[in-house]
Image (cartoon, rainbow, N blue to C red):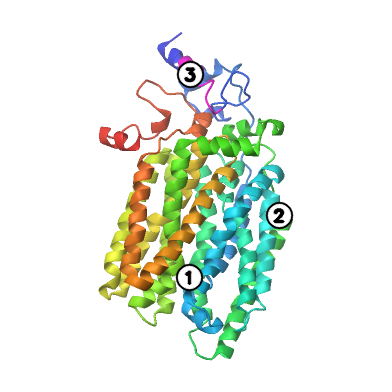
Amino acid sequence: MSDKDGRVKSWLESHRDTDCYLDNDSSCSLAEHDPSQRGAQGRASLDSDTNLFPLMETKLYLRRWLMLLIFCLFSMTNAFMWLQYSIISNIFMHFYSVDSLALDWLSMIYFLTYIPFIWPVTWLLDKRGLRDIVLVGSAFNCIGAWIKTGTAEPNMFPMTFFGQFVCSLATVYLLGIPSRLASLWFGQQEVSTACSIGVLGNQMGIAVGFLVPPMLVPNVEDKAELAEHIRVMFYITAGVSTVLFVLVALVFQDKPELPPSQAQAQARSIHPDEYSYTASILRLLKNKPFMLLVLSYGLNVGCFYAVSTLLNRIIVEHYPGEEVNAGRIGLTIVIAGMVGSLICGIWLDKTKTYKQTTLVVYLLSLCGMLVFAFTLNLGRLWLVFVTAGVLGFFMTGYLPLGFEFAVELTFPESEGTSSGLLNCSAQILGIIFTILQGKIIDKWGTFAGNIFLAFMLLIGTAVTALIKADLRRLKANIQNPPAGPEASLQDYGATSCSALWRLLTY
């Protein structure tokens, strides 16, 4: 046996008892189904162990892109309804005669609803599958939108709050879906990109939520005229939500007939009787790298939620009467973030440097928050657009990184469960940060509020640096075992890093 084969054999033996279930009795494989994608040496060495690690049949279906598109559209409408009040909060405060905190709760109800309902929904995702969850979520989205069509009257604030609550239930059914859908339908070399696109649906909705309400609902004193503009916005949203509900019911599918990757084939090989939702939750809670990620993800996304919810107040304080430009600044944040999300997803598919990329993006989010805070009061609106775009590029670009890093750290646990815990952390901290920043802004101004968020991002950066990158899904999908002792699955695609960088990202 050659030295190369000996190293391969040794590597296979050393990974038989890992948490990825790569043992002699497993039906999973360490190679992609297409042998043409493997090198000659890797093919020879793996073929010699075929009896231990048999390849499973995999296939990529063209309709996977249709499933992703439908989900993105559904997610977009729900995210739009999250922000359709807060971006013109001063107008709705006047229309409904409520204070700023009451209006902020129309956005924060999305966060609060998620916390108790995520647990039964992730259980249903494991038991009922992806299609049923997306179908129920789109139904809640549609019902809530139609409830709000009857609330364009100054005395209907309680009913509009109820309609927003029903829409928030839909959020519970969609926030954890991008990583789950990507894993079920997309191959190893495109799964992170697909997850990023899934997140883009939510970001597109936020972008439309920043842009459209200020255009449809002008700041006028006459409440009767305001009611007409608000009613038009509500009916447009309800119509779009109805069309998407019908589309989900007729077209959306649970999963393809054949798995798209060896990792997904391995996950499918686990018999339902061997899976326990409670045991899965307990394993995740005991997974230290993942729990550190839960905290750091919550800190970052919680800050993003606070900025998004309070953006109107932040901008109008320094630039009175600029409600439309506040929406455009929010749009700039989200569009830049969409570009960042897509770039990060493609980068992960190419390099698999989950830890390194997450840490860099987190650090740059902190820098972006500081620049935004220190330049907001300079009186130059064009500069606010630039700094907000930089902040959005990195802060929003972090979202798919967190999802994909979580899947790597927790494989073969359900992607819906790990994403649910991430989002639960984000919702809790989103409520806390939104309330605290609002109080700080009321007492000390926007600069103090933004510095508060920057401090939270500093803590998150430190927590991210402590995460040990145990890339379990990559171990199940790896095409060639390491060629030497210097190669590491945790440093896949990043073996040229400096010693200092390795120390920071260990």
For label 1, the crowd category at 10 Å Cα-Cα, with few meaning under 14, some 14 to 19 and many 20 or more, is many
For label 2, the crowd category at 10 Å Cα-Cα, with few meaning under 14, some 14 to 19 and many 20 or more, is few
Q: Tell me which corner region of the image, top left, top right, bottom left or bottom right, holds residue 32.
A: top right
Q: Position of residue 120 (x, y in %)?
A: 66, 49
Q: Marks 2 and 1: CB-CB under 8 Å? A: no
Question: Circle 1 — which element?
Answer: helix
Residue ID at (56%, 24%)? 22
Is 280 within the magenta? no
502 vs 216: above or below:
above
Looking at the image, can residue 150 be seen? yes
Q: Identify residue for label 2.
A: 251
For label 3, the crowd category at 10 Å Cα-Cα, with few meaning under 14, some 14 to 19 and many 20 or more, is few
Looking at the image, can residue 188 be seen? no
CA distance for labels 3 and 2? 44 Å
Q: Which residues are magenta?
A: 9-20
Give, as a three-letter code, the residue at label 2. Answer: Val
The total of numbered circles placed on residues is 3
Q: Earlier in the sequence, mark 3 or mark 1?
A: 3
CA distance for labels 2 and 1? 30 Å
Q: Is residue 243 left or right of residue 501?
A: right
228 vs 316: above or below:
below
Q: Earlier in the sequence, mark 2 or mark 1?
A: 1
Label 2 or label 1, whichever lies nearer to me, is 1
Q: Which mark is residue 14?
A: 3
Q: Position of residue 246 (x, y in %)?
A: 72, 62
Residue ID at (53%, 51%)? 424
Q: Which mark is residue 210?
A: 1
Residue ID at (57%, 34%)? 412
Residue ID at (34%, 45%)? 462
Give, as a three-letter code, the residue at label 3. Answer: Ser
